[in-house]
Each structure stands twice: as C-alpha cells, then as structure tokens.
Image (cartoon, coloured by chain):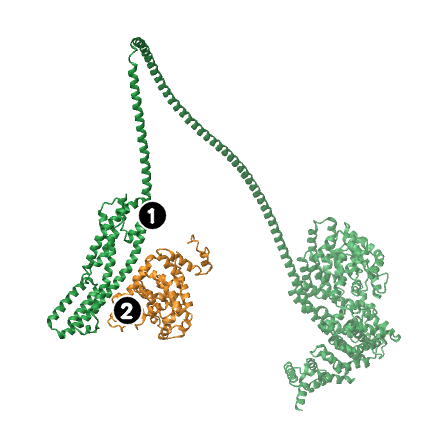
Amino acid sequence: MAEDPQRNFRSVYYEKVGFRGVEEKKSLEILLKDDRLDIEKLCTFSQRFPLPSMYRTLVWKVLLGIIPPHHESHALVMKSRKEQYRDVYHALQVIRFIKDSTPQVEIFLRVHQLELGKLPHNPSFLLVKDEIFLAIAKAMEEMVEDTIDCYWLVSCFVNQLNNKYKDSLPQLPKILEQYLNLEDSRLLAHLKACSAMSKLPYNLWFKKCFAGCLPESSLQRVWDKVISGSCKIIVFVAVEILLTFKMKIIALNSAEKITQFLENIPQDNTDAIVSKAIDLWHKHCGTPVHSV
Amino acid sequence: MAQQANIGELLSMLDSPVLLVLEDITTAFRENLNSDRGPLLVNTLVDYYLEANSQQALHLLSMLQEPHDKHLLDKINEYMGKSATRLPTLSLLGHVIRRQPSWKHKLSEAPLLLSLLKCLKTDTDVVVLTTGVLVLITMLPMIPQSGKQYLHDFFGIFGRLSAWCLKNTGHVAEIYLVHLHASVYALFHRLYGMYPCNFVSFLRSHYSMKEHLETFEEVVKPMMEHVRIHPELVTGSKDHELDPRRWKRLETHDVLIECAKISLDPTEASYEDGYYSVSHQPCPRLPHRPADSTASPYISMQSSYGALTSTPYSTPRLKVSQTPGQLPQILNSQFTMLSTEPQQVTIWSPSASCGMTTPPTSPGIALEFSQTASQPYSKFFGTPGGKGTPLGTPATSPPPPCISDEFVHVSLPPAAVALPKKEDKPDAGRPSLSRQQNVINNEKTSEASGNKDSVGLLDLQDFLGGLVSYEDSVEKDREEDAISKEISEITTADAEPVVPRGGFDSPFYHPNESLSGSQKKPLTAASSVQGHSLNSEPLTSSLDKSGFEGVPETPKQAFTPIDKPWGGSNNSAGNRESRTSSIETSILTPSPCKIPAHRRMGFGSGQPSPYEHLFEVALPKTAYLFVSKKTDELLKKTKANADEECPSSTSPMEVLDRLIQQGADAHTKELNKLPLPSKSADWTHFGGSPPSDEIHTLRNQLLLLHNQLLYERFKRQQHALRNRRLLRKVIKATALEEHNAAMKDQLQLQEKDIQSLKLSLQKEQARYRQFQEEHDNVVAQLHCQIRQLQHDREEFYNQSQELQTKLEDCRNMITDLRLELKKANNKVCHTELLLSQVSQKLYNSESVQQQMEFLNRQLLVLGEVNELYLEQLQQKHADKTKEVEMMQAAFRKELAKEKFYVQQQSQRLDASQKRIVELESQLAKKDHLLLEQKKYLEDVKIQARGQLQAVESRYKAQKRITQTFELEILDLYGRLEKDSLLKKLEDEKTEAAEAAEERLDCANEGCTDSVAGYHEETIGRNGETKPLSVRGSSSSSSSELSTPEKPQNQRVGQFSTHWETSVPLEPSTSAPLTVGSLPSSKSFLGMKARELFRNKSESQCDEEGVTLNNLSDTSKPELSKDLSMEAKTPPSPDNPSPLPKNPESSVGQLHIMDYNETHHDHS
C-alpha cells in the first residue's frame, strides 16, 4: 500500500499514535477498487476496523458470497439474484403463501424456507429457527434499504450462522464463563451463586447475534465482525454487557430477575459497550494482522 | 501513808549488812522508782542519805533516771539553801554528776546551778567552797554550751576564790587553802581551756584593778605559768568560743582533754596529737644531728621542731658525745667530753637563748645535708617513719629521767641516738626483749627490781655483742661510733622499762646508775660524780625560775615543764637522801598524806594493769607504747614530788600531792610511834590550830581529800574513755598502715611484673624488628632475583624474537629458494623443451640439408634435363602456343561463373538466418501471450464460476419453485380427483392412478430425496386420505402449466448459447488447424480471445481469423438447428435429467478446451 500515491503516507503512524479509522475509508476504497476483490483482505479489514456505512452492504454481500469478487459479473449476478427472489416471491404468491399484506420479514422467511425446500404446511406455526430468522431479518431490514439485498444478506447470514458457526456456537457459554472469570471473578461468583449462569439469555445473545437486543447502529458493528468470520466477538459483547451492568446485576439476587434484566437492557450507551467489547476482544484474541 | 511507812522500812533496811537483803531492797527501790513518778521516794532517799550518809542511798540516787531528776534537783536545791546540809548536799551532787546521768544537760537549766553559784559566791566555808568548786569543775564540761550564760558567774567565783586563797579571809587552816588552791587551779585550767578568750578578757579586766594586782602576782600568774597559749586566743574570738557548734561535736572527755592539752603541768597535761609530738620529737631527732663544731644550727634545728621544746641537757651532751664518737676511743672522748662539758654549757647558753626566740631554719637544713656520718641514720629514720616514730617517741620520752642518770656518765646521748636505731635495726629481737623486760618488771615490786635489772642488762650486753659483731663490717670510725651508741642504747633500754617500775622510787635509779657505771670504766664513774655536781647546779637554778626569767646559767634548760622532770629526776637521783629529808621538813601534816600515798601506789602500779594485758594481746607495739606512755606519766607525777623545793613555781596540784605524800609518810611514822610527843610538835609546826579543832580539821581534810580523789577518779574515767577511743584509732591506723605496706609490696611486685613485661615486650619488639629486617632482606633479595629473572626473561624473549625473526627470514629464504628452484626447474624444462625443439630443428635442418642436397642433385639433373629440353624446345617451339591460350581463356570463364554462384549461396544463407531470428522472437512473444491468456482465462473461469453459482442457486430456487408448484398441483389434482370421484366411477380412477404413478416415477428420477419423500407422502395421501388435498384453491391448470414451462424454455435458450460455444469446438479439436483453435467469435470467450490476438499479433491472426470466421459461420447454422431441435424435443418436465447434465458437460468441455491443444498447434 505504501507505493500507492493516493494513500496518505502518515496512515501507518495514525494507528501508533492512537487514532483509529482515519484512513479506513480510503483504504477500503482502495481495496474495493481492485478488480477481483480480495476477500481475505476485506475480512481482515472488517475485523480490524468498523466499516463505513456506505460500503457496508457491498462488503457484506461480497463477504457472504452474494456477489462474486469480479466487478463485471456483479450486475449479472445481482440480476439473477433479483430474478430468483422475484421468482420465489411470485411462486409464493401463486401458491398463496403470502399476500400483499404479509410483512416483509415474513416474506423473507417464506422465501428462505422455500429456497431450502422447507416450506411448512402451516404458515402460522413458527419454529425457534424461524424466530431467530425473523429477529435477524428484522434487524437487517433496518440496516439495509433494498429488500432484495436485505433478503439475500439475511439469508446468507443465517446460513453462515447455521453452517460455519454450527460447531462453535454451543461452546460460547463456556467461553463466556472463562472470560468473565478473567475480567471479574466476583461477578461470576455472584452469578454462580444465583445460579444465573445457565439462565443467561444465550438464545438472544448467541443464536440471534444480539438482534433485538442491541440497537441496529451498534449491532451492525458487531455483525461486521461476525460476518467477517469471528463469532467470539459475541462472547465479548456479552461479557461487556455483564460488566457494564455489574452493579445492577449484583444488586439482583434471583436468576430470573437477572435474565429478565439482561433481556431488556437499556439502549442508551450500547455504542460504548460495543466499543469496549471490541477492545476487549482485541485484547484477548489479539488484533488481526494488518494485511491491508 | 502506808507507802510512806513502807519506804521508811525499806530505808531502814537499806544499809543492811546482809547482801541478799541489800539486793532485794535495791531492786525494790528501783521498781518503786520505775513505777512511781512522784517526788516522794526521791525526797525520802535524799533525806535518808543526808541523815545516815548511806552509801546505798547514794548509789540509788546517783542511778536515778529521767523522770526523777527534777525532784532530785529540787530537793538538792532545797537543801543547798541550808548551810547545815550544804556540804553533804554538795557531795551528793558531786556523786550524782560524776555518774554522768543522762539528764545532765538539764543541769544548766535547773535552779540548782544558780544556787550552787550563789553558794560559791557567798559561802565562806573552805570545805564547802572546795567541794563546790570541784562539783562545778566536774559539771562544766558537761554543760559547755548552756553554761555560757553563767560565764561571768564562773569568772567571778574564780576571782573570789583566787583572792581567797591569797588573803585567807576566813583564817582557815593552811591545809584547807592548799586544797582550795588546787581546786582553784583546776578551775583555772578548766575555764582557760574552755573559754580562753572570755577568760583572758576577764582576767585582763579583773586584774587590771590595783586591789587585785597582788592576787594576780601571787596566785594567778603562777597558774598561768602552767598553761601554754591557747590556740583559740589566736584563731578564736569571744563569740566563737561560745558558739554551740564548737561544743556540739565534743563529748565530756573531749572537753577534758582539750583543757588538759593546753596545760603544761605534768600532772594535768595530756600530750596528745600535735602537742605531744612537738614536745618530744626532738629527742629522737637528736642523733641525726651532726657532731659538728657549729652548734647554732643544731639548736635552731631543735627550735624548728618546737619553740617551747628544747632539750637543754641532751643537746650539749649529745653534741659532746657525738664529737668524741668520731674519735677512735670512746672512753677518751667521753673523758674529754666530760671535761669540756661545762665550757660548752657556758658557750652555748646564748645560742640556746637565741634558739628559743627566733631560730633561723635554713642553716639547720643545710647542716643536715652537710653531715656525713649520721646521714644513714637519718635515712633510716625517714623510711620506717610509719612504725618508727610512734615507737620512737614513747621510747624516747622516758629517757629524760634516765638521761639524767646517764648524764652522769655521759653515755646518754648515744643512747638516745641508738634507741630509735635499736628499734629499727634489730626489729625482731629488740622490742620483744624490752617488752619482756617490761612485763617482768611489772611483775616485780619496786624493791626487787634491782636483780631484775641486772639480768636484763646482762641480756642486753649479750645482745650488744651480737650487734657489735654485726657492725664489724662497717667502717672503723663508724664502727666505734656504733659501739658506743649500742652501749648507751642498752643502758637506756634498761632504764626505760625500769623507770615505770620505779615510779617515784628512788632506789630504782641507783641500780641503774651503778649498772651503767659498772659498765663503763672507772673514769666514767668519776665523771658521773662530776656530772652530778654539774647537773645539780643548773637544775636548782632552773627550778627557781623557769626559762622565762632567762637565767644565763641555765640556758639549755627549757622553760617547758616537760623538761623539768628531768631536772626533777636528776635531783631525785642525785639528791635522794636530801630530798626525803627536805620533804619531811616541808610537809605540813603527815596524816592526810596517807591516803594519797596509797592512792599513788595504786596509780603507779595498779592502774595500767587493766589495760595492759589487753594491749599486749591486741597490739604489741601499741601496748608497748601505751605502757611506756603510762610509765612516763607516772614518772612525771613522781617527779613532781621533787619540785617541792620551789613551791612558787610548782603547781598547786603538786603541792597538794606533796602534802598528801607527806601525810602518808607522817602517817606511817605515826603508826610506828603513835604516842610520840613529836606529834604535837609536828602538828604545831605550822602554827596550826588547837587539838580540839584538829579532829574537825582532819575530818574536813579527809572530806576534801575524798572530794579531790573523786574528782581525780572522774578525770581518770574520762581519760580511760578517751584512751579506749584513741586505742581504737591506733589499731585502725596500724591496720591501715599494714594494709598500706601490703599494698605497697603489691605495687612493687606489680611494678616488677610491669618491668619484666616491658623487658619482654622490648625483647619481643627487638625480635620482631629483627624478623622484620630479615624479612625485608629476604623480600629485597627476592625482589632482586625477580628483577634479574625478569631481565633474563626479557633477554630470552628478545633472543627468541630475534631467533623467530631469523627463522622467518630463513623461511622466506627457503620460499625464495624454492621459488628460484621452481624457476630454475622451469628454465630447465624450458631449455629441455628448447633443446628438443632445437634438436628437432636440427634434425629437420639435417633432413632439409639432405633434401637440399638431393634437390641440388635433382637441380643439377634437371638443369641438365632443362638444357636438354631447351635444346629440344628450341627445336620444336613454333606451333603449340595457340592451343594453350585457348584453354586458359576457357578456364577463366569457368572460374568467374563459380564465384558468382558462391556469392548467391551466401546471400541465401544470410536471409534464412534472419528469418530464424525473427521467428524465434515471435515465438517468445507468443509464449508470453499464452501466459497472459492463461491468467485471464483463470480469471474468467472464476468469474464464470461466480456467475454460475448465482445461476445455479437461481436454478435451485427454480427447482424448489417447481417442486412447490408440483406439490400444489398435486394437491389440486387430489382435490379434483376427490371431486371427480363423486362424479365418475372407478375407470377414471385407474387413469388418475396411472398418472400419479407416472408422476411418481419422474419425481423419483429428478427430484432430491426430500422432495421425493414429500411426493411419496403426497401420493400416499392421494391414495388414502383426501381431505389434505382439498385445500387447494380453484386455479386454472393452464396458467399453472404454462408458467413452469416458460422458465424452462428460457433456460434452454440460455443453455443454447453455451451449447453453441461448446459444440463448434468439437470439430475444431478434430480438424487440423494450423494456427491454434479460437473460440467462436460469437461466444464471449471467442470475442475476448480475438481481441487479445488482434492486439498482439495482427498480421498473422488476421489471415487466420478469416478462415476461422469462415469455419464458424459454416458450422453455426447447423449446430443451432440441431440444438433447437433437441431443445424442443424435451420440453416436458418428464425428462429433466439431460438438461442439468448439459451445462455440466459444457463446463467440462470448456475445461477441456484448454490451451494445451492450441498451444501444441501453435508450436
């Protein structure tokens, strides 16, 4: 990157001084300029820095494999994606599974189910999986404007969660306990004393990836990391939530109250929580190699 | 009253002769006294005593304790007022006071004292006065402080009584006056001793009046002769001597001694401490004095010791004796000395007087230094001073009497000299000997002493012999001197112990004298006579008046009373007979003297005994000292008797003593011849009183004497007290001295140790120094060695370096030599080579020479031939030239032709080479191009894969859609059939079943398992349950059917493009294309490839591209037709399997359509 004249030569030092994200946008643009996008680099970038919102959708699409790394095929691929969605949508309409009044999220769910060939006979019956999908889709709907993009992102994100992180997601509660012990053993002891450790909202945190728990502005920064391949960040967000509301948690004695409180945490300073969680994650898992 | 009676009874029984009753009574009285605090008992006791003069009552009264004192004093005071009972009351008071009761301090406050003083002031009875004065004198030391308020009363009493003594106003008996005088004398002493300043001022004021002047001259002045100047007169003042602090630390006996100290009266005086030593020390010092001709320093020396004490007799005599001591013959010297003595006496009188006044001290000291012979002695005295002086002083103090005796034979001074020496030198033998003698002497009576003395003398003589032998080694002069001293020493030693025994006995001296005389030559005997006469003369004169008068004939005789005894003793020795007679004549009454005589005897022999044995046990030396002291005192007392010849100068005490002695003598005489008429004559000797008075007088005298005795006894007790204390001090001092000596010894030992240690230290230091030096030497040596070795080493090092350099040089030389050797070898080789070449050449040249020779020969031969041919030629020269020329021309033409041909060939070669280079460059370009193409193709493949994935997913979605549709359709069918079931019958039903089976088959073939499962389920439902399918809505089947077909067609259309691209490639692989196979121009790949090729190799590709286009154009319509035919044939969903396979195969063909083949073609 040093030979690139467009880049500010000071960018290397900004980080050392402590500024972050000064030149990120530019470096991301440079990354995106490459024909045949380098997915590895994009992953690293996304893990290191928060993505600029204007490129977020594009990067996510690329990272989730919705569009190929070649720019030329983008239009074509997107066209086919659109058509696919429309086809499915049309088919659903034809078989009268959805109506015009059906909410967008449910449409996504149905489309997704149809694509997987798992369209249920009874549309009113919702599985846990479907609830997760709905939550994620709802969050994603807020983040992305275009419906087709949104559908694909949701679909791929859920697929990634179900496939790539299938093995690691069940491990997360243990990891949470481990890091909580490192950070604040007293809190952990309290939680254990209340036997609240097993009753923490793991479903909300780990399976829904905090969809519905955090506001979208904060959530998308978490998802940046999740999409770019690290599911551990979820653990640190959870740890940070516990640490932030430590006093309140300690004040609460029963596991039910704690769970109830954690499921409805206040939304005011979630940005700070996420920033701290990312710092914590960097601290414990190390900063990804600066390969940009 | 009963008690009163009881007391009366007790009193009556008090004087019971039975001892047990007496004891009971005394205890009863004591108990009564203890229990009863009232004055009754005391009063009765006093009354009883006054009535019966009971000793027991007196005893009881004198033992009275504190609470009764007031009653007693009151009672005594009461009786004191009555003149009748005054005398016994006074004696009672005296008794009580002498007991020293614990309440004695109250005396001063009691009215009794006032009444006593009043009595003394007013009374006219001599007996009462004497008794009162004695009581007062006894009382004074007890109340020194509180009595000061009555000081003027005391003084007044003194003035009155002294006047009384002189005037005898009451016209009482002389003998009373003697007593009174004695008591006044004692009072004088007491007052002077206690309150000197006040007393002197009183005397001054009192006797300054004319009416008292006579009294002073007659009475007081002689008294003053017997006292020395009180130190308080110098240092103290009137107020100071009344200061309570002065008296506080003094006890009664201390006060007594204080008073006795200032007394010069031998009977009164006590020589303790400073006074004593001052007065007597000159005696031992005498021997130190040189026997020089100059006598003035000598005297001054003496005077330096004490102004008052100059031993007049000893001094000249000493001198005399010393001077002859230097002469070889003692006897001669003594003789001469004796002869010269009188002269010397006259000569030295002024100097002695000088010495008495103010003697210069310095010459004495100088003289002391100048003396040679006696110096050792002086040293001798100096060193043992601790022991010697205390011993020496008492030892020398007795000599005076003996001196007087020996004086006669002139051996005294040496004796005085030797005495201290003896004590020091033969320390072990001498004192013991003398002491032994002393003890023996004490045992003996005075009469039997003569034998004893002789024995002692014999012993001494033996000892002397030993001493003489001891002294043999000494120088001759000194030897003789020593001998003379020893002799005299012996005599003194004898005299000394003898004296106490003698007491006042004159016979005692006689043997002494005779012994000393016998010891010496007849000459001395004569001289002794002479001495007697000589001595007596000055003595008498001196006795007349003391040194104050300054009689020129007796200058040596000091005015000190201490010296007087000598004179007295001399007199007693010499004038033995005359004295007794004179005494007899002088004594007033023999009868009263009896008791004193007895007393004296007790005094002389009895008194020392209670202490002596103690002293002997405790401290031999001190005992000796004590005894000698005691004897001295006794001696003095005895000598006091001799002073009767000069009553004016003698003290009243002496007079009294003498009186008593005379009385004793008279008494003895009276006992012998009691009814003698001389008795009356005796009695009337003093013109005394009639016999009727005589008894009364005698009684009074007895009383007075008793009083006196009691007083003296009291004094004695006080002295005893003091003696005890002093003894303790002496013991302590000696113990300390011994301790000191031991310490000194230890110190010396330690000093010796220290010295030895120092010596050893020095030795060690010397050794150490030696070692150090050795060590230093060794070190220096080693250093030298090291230096040498280092030097050697350096040399060796240098040598080795030199050798190394040499070695290197040698090596260099060797290498050089080797190089040279090599060079030489090379040269040799080279020269060998050259040699071989040369030999070759030589060989060649030889062969050449041979050839040359051969050729020369040939040449010769040819020459000859030539000549021959020339001859022939000349003969045939004409016709042959034309033909040759023709042939030459032909050959030239031929050569030119060939040259042209060669040129042509080389040009062709160049051209072909150029062509080869060109082609190679083209090949490289093509390779590069191919690589790029490959990359691009990869890229494109990935791109295509992405697109394909999208398409695939779309396809899958499509499939899902169709499946759902099918499901829907089936559902609908199920419903339709259900409906038709009601209408149609079973045959229709079978048709529906067939259709269902068909459907099932196709589903089994094309669908995924899940879909298939689903189908089966639906089929199962179709066959068994119908209500599920009823759900389907009433939708037109045509529309449903058309929709699935439409996308299918579209897809086929899409695939056809692929098909188009893939199909024409098949023939291209088989067709023999010269310039690589390119994808069809219509396909995406082909377009791209064409573009690429156009860019890179235009010239060639253009031509080939044309052919390609032609080929593709020709094949395309056919293929498209075929494809369309095929695509149309399987429109039904029954056969979906070939369709999905096609794209796969096309993809595989795309893969196969690799550059490998084209590449091969190109190459």
Q: Which element type, helix, strand or loop, lies under badge 1?
A: helix
Q: How crowded is mark 1: few (under 14 residues within 10 Å), some or many (20 or more)?
A: few
- Please say if B341 is above or below B806: below
State which chain is coloured green: B
Which of the 4 image quarters holds residue B288? Answer: bottom right
Residue ID for mark 1: B1095
Q: Where is residue B31 in the image (x, y as percent from the top left)?
A: 64, 84
A169 lies left or right of B68:
left
The answer to whether the residue labelled 2 contacts the one labelled 1, judged by CB atoms less than 8 Å apart, is: no
The residue type indicated by label 1 comes to Asn
Residue mark closest to the camera, 2 vs 1: 1
The chain painted orange is A
The residue at the far right in this view is B210
Same chain for the residues under marks 2 and 1 in the image: no
- Whether residue B662 appears in this view of the structure is no
Residue at 67%, 60% in the rendered image = B432
* Left or right of residue B1078: residue B230: right
Residue B22 visible from this viewpoint: yes
Toward the viewer: B1036 or B622?
Answer: B1036
Residue nearest the viewer, comparing A204 with B857: B857
Residue name at image x 63 percent, y 56 percent: B747
- Chain letter of disc 2? A
Give percent across and percent down for residue B665: 77, 71
The residue labelled by disc 2 is A110
**Image quadrant assignment for residue B637:** bottom right
Q: Position of residue B805 (x, y in %)?
A: 49, 32
Which residue is painted at 71% across and 66% down in the image? B445
Tell which of A132 and B724 is nearer to you: A132
In-front residue for pair A77/B119: A77
Q: What residue type is labelled 2?
A: Arg
Mark 2 vs mark 1, CA separation in Å = 51 Å
